[in-house]
Amino acid sequence: MRKSTSARRRSHDRGAASCGLSLVAIAALVVVRTRDPVAQSVTVSFYGVLLAVLFVLFQAPDVALSQIVVCAVALPLMILLALAKIKKQREHEP
């Protein structure tokens, strides 16, 4: 008996979702294991993009757009600005 088109699509969507979840889990471990703050801001940005892709797979493009703005742009930018300010303050200390 042949599978219907919707049954094949559901199994394909399940495979893509499980692959996306696996990638997000691996990326989360990479973020946690990264010790350098600058490298960690880059990895958290990549993690945010992966989460956005996962949200698109789960048919939530509005949440994906918010995720890209917050996790892939704003958060790494704030981390890098804070690190630059700390470095500047340490240079001026006697």
Image (cartoon, rainbow, N blue to C red):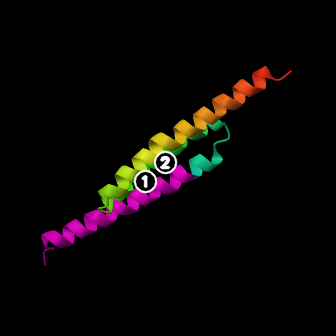
* Above or below 89: residue 56: below
Q: Which residue is mark 2?
A: 47
The kind of residue on which mark 2 rests is: Tyr
The kind of residue on which mark 1 rests is: Leu
The answer for how far apart the CA atoms under marks 2 and 1 are is 6 Å
**The stretch drawn in magenta includes residue 20:** yes
Q: Main secondary structure of the magenta part?
A: helix
**Where residue 79 sits in the image (x, y, percent)?**
59, 39
Magenta-drawn segment: 1-28
Of the pair 2 and 51, the residue shown nearer to us: 51
* Above or below 4: residue 68: above
**Disc assigned to residue 37:** none
Mark 2: few, some, or many residues within 10 Å (few <14, many ≥20)? many
Which type of secondary structure does the marked residue at label 1 adopt? helix
**The stretch drawn in magenta includes residue 27:** yes
**Where residue 10 sits in the image (x, y, percent)?**
25, 69
Question: Hey, which residue is sitting farthest bottom in the picture?
Answer: 1
Q: Which residue is mark 1?
A: 51
